[in-house]
Image (cartoon, rainbow, N blue to C red):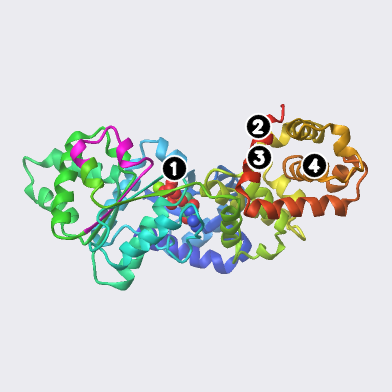
Amino acid sequence: MENSILWNNFLDVIKSKISSVSFDTWFKETKLIKNENNKLLIQVPMSFHKKFLNETYYDLIDEILVGITGNSFDLDFIVEEEIKDSDNEIDEKNIDTTYSNLNSNLNSKYTFENFVIGESNRFAQTAAVAVAEQPGKIYNPLFIHGKSGLGKTHLMHAIGNYVINNSEKKVLYVTSEEFIADFIGINKKENNNFDIVDHFKEKYRNIDVLLIDDIQFLGGAEKTQHEFFHTFNTLYDSNKQIIISSDRSPDDLKLLEDRLRTRFRWGLTVDIFPPNFELRCKILKDKMVGHEVANLVKNEVIEYIATNCENDVRHLEGAITRLYAYAAIMCPKEINLDFAVEALKDYIGKSIYITNNITKIQKAVADYYNITIEDLKSKKRHANISYPRQIAMYLSRMTTEETIVKIGLEFGNRDHSTVLHSCEKIAKELNNNEKLKNKLKEIKNKIVN
Ligand code: ADP
Ligand code: MG
């Protein structure tokens, strides 16, 4: 039985046997990556899953697999990073290449529908939709660049999925590493097996839309660059769409041949930037929906995560996975800030969070605004004191372990509702005030640890 079929069967069965929270938390993101000599290697999102699945679900998994296949298996769990680190990488590649002959290598979970749009990615998203609607016609090639975790791969798959769902066109998604692997594959056998050469050419040159992810890894491989150049030309000349992603702009791809870089500039180059606070909140909300405990999550939790996971979307997703995993164990009545802080204590803001205390924040804010800590604690209501006070309360709430009550006490014995009000006000303002956001960043950097 094909790995994916076996595993999908398994997932269907286990889904009916455990709660949907448990399923979503422990099994939804798993994948069977190797099945050899009755040993199954199962990919899981975090090492936390490895431990938990081994301790809690091993017997149930085994029982279900026996039910499906008649065999008992040894189970081994592995996290994605470990696969990348180990030489076993080839196993995953093998699966991908066999599959790519049959289909497009596309992951159906990445679509335009679930790509959340904000200022930082709107241009890239719009260009991606345009290309998906009119492949080969308007922007060719489309070059998407941006730092890791900002949605390049997601957008590429979304384009591919859109094309295969709305046309008869042939799509192929590969990472540049897979492209190299395919190429090396033919190189080895070049002298005695022309079928494979033809096969490579057919695979890459007979398609309508070619998506090559992470082109920066093509850097060192000169022969492959050469082949890619020809593949590019063949496709381009016959108006086939090419979409390329990279962690840097064409100009910064120093290891690529000039003629390739020049080609990349023929089309449209779009940049994806890190999401701002507002988009981070939007993405978090979007990704939390649908989970059984989603309606237990308080808004303050979203703000807390959005404040502390600033750089990329993968980081936000990791926070949700951990939050939900913790919720599956603790079964809380509501997922509030305290719960989130506990659930994510090893994951986010370690340096800010653990070492911060209210006094340090007060000092940083007071210095920044040229007032004193006493001012912050005083009853003074003038805006040049009360505004910094609200900021200091907000930072205390978001980056320390203290309760609202304690924060109130530290700010001249104020009521907890005053603290809440201040935090909400600042959080709201952060939604559309980039200046304030930068100020907070500066202040955070000034907090002495
Ligand atoms: P990159 O390829 O740029 O490193 P990915 O496309 O792999 O980033 O994105 C990392 C994760 O973040 C993926 O799970 C992806 O679905 C998610 N993601 C990124 N941007 C968005 C977005 N705007 N809306 C929804 N999910 C996103
Ligand atoms: Mg990627």
Tell me the distance, in whole angstroms, between the alpha carbons under discs 1 and 4: 38 Å
Mark 4: amino acid = Asn
Q: Residues within 10 Å of mark 4 (few under 14, many from 20)?
A: few
Mark 3: amino acid = Lys
Q: Are marks 4 and 3 in contact (CB under 8 Å)?
A: no
Tell me the distance, in whole angstroms, between the alpha carbons under discs 2 and 3: 10 Å
Tell me the distance, in whole angstroms, between the alpha carbons under discs 1 and 2: 22 Å
- Of label 4 and label 2, which has the lower sequence position? 4
Q: Nearer the viewer, mark 2 or mark 3?
A: 3
Image quadrant assignment for residue 48: top right
157 vs 386: above or below: below
Residue at image mark 4: 384
Report the side of 132 relative to 81 (left or right): left
Residue 242, given in percent of the width and then of the height, sits at: 25, 55
Q: Nearer the viewer, mark 4 or mark 3?
A: 4
Picture quarter with the N terminus: bottom left
Ligand 1 near label 1 (Cβ, under 8 Å)?
A: yes
At 27% across and 72% down in the image, what residue appears? 167
Question: Tag 3's secondary structure?
Answer: helix
Mark 2: amino acid = Asn
Front-lying residue, 32 or 198: 198
101 vs 222: above or below: below
Image quadrant assignment for residue 349: top right
Picture quarter with the C terminus: top right
- Of label 4 and label 3, which has the lower sequence position? 4
Magenta region: which residues?
A: 241-260
Tell me the distance, in whole angstroms, between the alpha carbons under discs 4 and 3: 15 Å
Is 122 within the magenta?
Answer: no
Residue at image mark 2: 445
Tag shown at residue 147: 1
At 28% across and 67% down in the image, what residue appears? 134
